[in-house]
Amino acid sequence: MPGGRLTNEERQHIATGLAQGLGYTEIGRRLGRPASTVMREVTRNGGPDGYGATRAHEATQQRARRRKQAQPPPPPAPDSGHGRDPREVQDFAESFTALLEQQGLPRMAARVLVCLYITDSGALAAADLVERLRVSPASVSHAVTFLEQQGMLRRERTPGGRRERYALDDEVWLRATLAAVQMNDALVAASQRATEILGAATPAGARFESSAEFLLLVSESLQKAMEQWRQTRTARSAGRGQ
């Protein structure tokens, strides 16, 4: 059935089709399957020259069994004495991670960011992130590097300076927006240059000119929003100091 799992019989047809020199599109047409399904099946099971129906079927069953062996859920964030429901905190962390993924953030980067976000200190060492997220140190390192490049966290030393940890604060989105503005400004400059090279009177040049105008408005709007936020923060801090 299209969309369902491939059967052993279908895998036999795929193997026969490959032996006959048929392409993925033709094999898929004969099976009533998308060519992409056939291509993924072959790619993950030895490629066109090494594909075997029986071996592929057994490998798929083994992968399915491994998936069924559910790994224990990651440990919930510590309560820190605030009377929080650990399960509710974990559920929120998962939903917030999914939301950030929908916004375009890589999954591991989103998980690291959320893990820091729901921690009262807003700072954790690499070992803490590895333990809480149950991932490899390399995964944490790659995610941290990405987030640091986006201006969404910073590196700092733990008290005593013995270990490095990663931290964020209330201005995480301000820094992320600043990074976005800087990238946007680069796009504005490039679009303006393209307009000069291609000629504003040409369709291609006009396209770049229109893009530059829009991107410039975006940058100006974001700059105003950041300045307004800074003023709000300053006024709030002054009010608390009185």
Image (spheres, grey):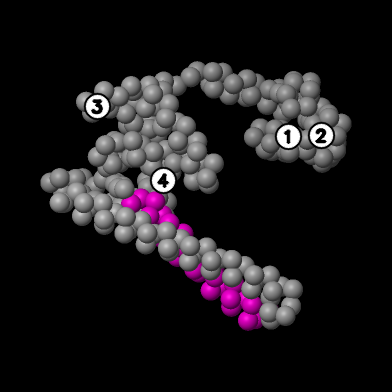
Q: Depth check: give the residue in front, 76 or 242.
A: 242
Looking at the image, is mark 4 or mark 1 earlier in the sequence? 1
Q: Depth check: give the residue in front, 139 or 56.
A: 139
**Which percent across, then down, holds residue 212?**
59, 70
Residue 200's quadrant in the figure?
bottom right
Circle 4 residue = 143
Residue 38 vs residue 216: left or right?
Answer: right
**Range drawn in magenta:** 171-198
Residue 156 falls inside the magenta stretch = no
Circle 3 residue = 82
Residue type beneath disc 1: Thr
Residue 178 falls inside the magenta stretch = yes
Looking at the image, is mark 1 or mark 3 earlier in the sequence? 1
- Checking the image for residue 28, the label placed there is 2
Residue 168 vs residue 211: left or right?
Answer: left
Q: Depth check: give the residue in front, 233 or 33.
A: 233
Q: Are marks 2 and 1 in contact (CB under 8 Å)?
A: yes
Q: CA separation, marks 2 and 4?
A: 38 Å
Q: CA separation, marks 4 and 1?
A: 30 Å
Q: CA separation, marks 2 and 1?
A: 8 Å
**Which percent across, then down, holds residue 201?**
72, 80
Q: Residue at x 29, y 54 (%)?
A: 233
The residue mark sitting in front, 2 or 4, is 4
Looking at the image, is mark 2 or mark 1 earlier in the sequence? 2
Residue type beneath disc 4: Ala
The residue mark sitting in front, 1 or 3, is 3
Task: Locate the N terminus by quadrant.
Answer: top right
